[in-house]
Image: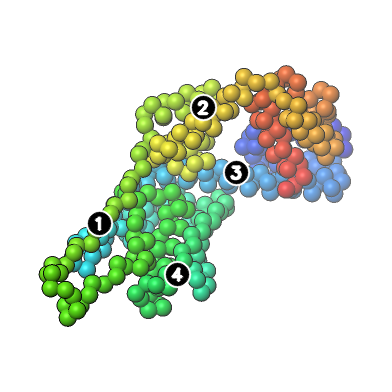
Amino acid sequence: MSKDKSLTVSPATKVEQLTDEKVENLLELAVREKVPVETMEKLLAMRRELKAEFAKQEFDKAMAKFQKDCPTIEKKKQVNNKDGTPRYKYAPLDSIIKQVKEIIYKNGFSYTIDTDVDDKSVTAICKVTHKEGHSEISKFKVPIDPGSFMNEQQKFASALTFAKRYTFCNSFGILTGDEDDDSNSMSVPDKPQNSPKTAPKTQNKPIPAKQTKTPVKPKIEPSQTKKIKAQLEVLGQELETLENAVRKPIGEWTKEGADNVIKTLESKIDDIKKPIDDATKKKLRDVVLELFNTTKNDEFNVATFTFENKKITDLNLYEGKKALGNLQATLDLAKGK
């Protein structure tokens, strides 16, 4: 096939710029030029990959919008101890769905919840699908408590209800007011007190059950938010991309989680100060060579290849790792993976 610039895709080209219309144009051009079947297969594979990439991007954008609009779910249902004192509160699944249903559909999502049951556990499987076609699956497994004071049907029903609610919340990144502790509903209760006939006379009053509350993890601090935004600016990255990766808006992160992100970003910034190492150079050259052999495109000539207008030997370690990730994604696309 003659070398046509309209069929050349630079490694620096963003996938989102390659619209479905442009790919269709490439296919039409390939048909007119009577390109080999192998080339047509690669173009068709590229179209599939681009559609999948676009669907994933739209899924992430919609999920970020959903999590921004989603309220913190209020726990209203209360479970009491035998003496009538409050034990804990939780938000039932039907209450959660009622509060978020409109926001789910507004952002183009649908969902299904399936279950997998064996003798010892129950697994709830929530599949979230966006209108553009991308789907993601979340699973939550709950063991059946053999010591629970319930019949067999109640044990399975209790575990299944708990699993469904948690996998649903995990799938959409939904938060409740506090950390739920209603897993206690499946735990073995305290041993019952001796009956009045056998109890010693000194035990005139029932001993109230000790109430415990799961401590709430500290939220992200303003200084941490400021630090993360400054680090992202140095790296040239968008906060929204990071929030999508974490699956939560930054305002809902914990202090501990924010510390971990800061350490990771700090490591990347340190890589900017370091020259590219020999191992990364070798990996880059190997990927570039494989791209050249796969695409026969002179842009992937090892001797002349540049990334962001720099030769491989002139890159810093951060740029080298970034280039390696981009090129590997390009190679996967070229191979139709």
Q: Which numbered circle lies on residue 211?
A: 1
Callout 4: SS: loop
Side (left or right) of 40 relative to 162: right
> What distance separates the C-alpha of mark 3 from that of mark 2?
24 Å
Q: Do labels 1 and 2 touch, CB within 8 Å?
A: no
Callout in the foreground (1, 4): 1
Of 193 and 85, which appears nearest the observer? 193
* N-term mark: 3 or 1: 3
Q: Which residue is mark 2?
A: 232
* N-term mark: 1 or 2: 1
Callout 2: SS: helix
Q: Residue at position x 72%, y 38% from top?
A: 328
Q: Residue at position x 29%, y 70% from top?
A: 191
* N-term mark: 3 or 4: 3
Amino acid identity at mark 1:
Gln
Q: Which residue is mark 3?
A: 54
Q: Do labels 3 and 4 touch, CB within 8 Å?
A: no
Amino acid identity at mark 3:
Phe
Q: Which image quadrant for residue 301?
A: top right
Amino acid identity at mark 4:
Ile
> What distance separates the C-alpha of mark 3 from that of mark 1?
50 Å
Q: Which residue is mark 4?
A: 144
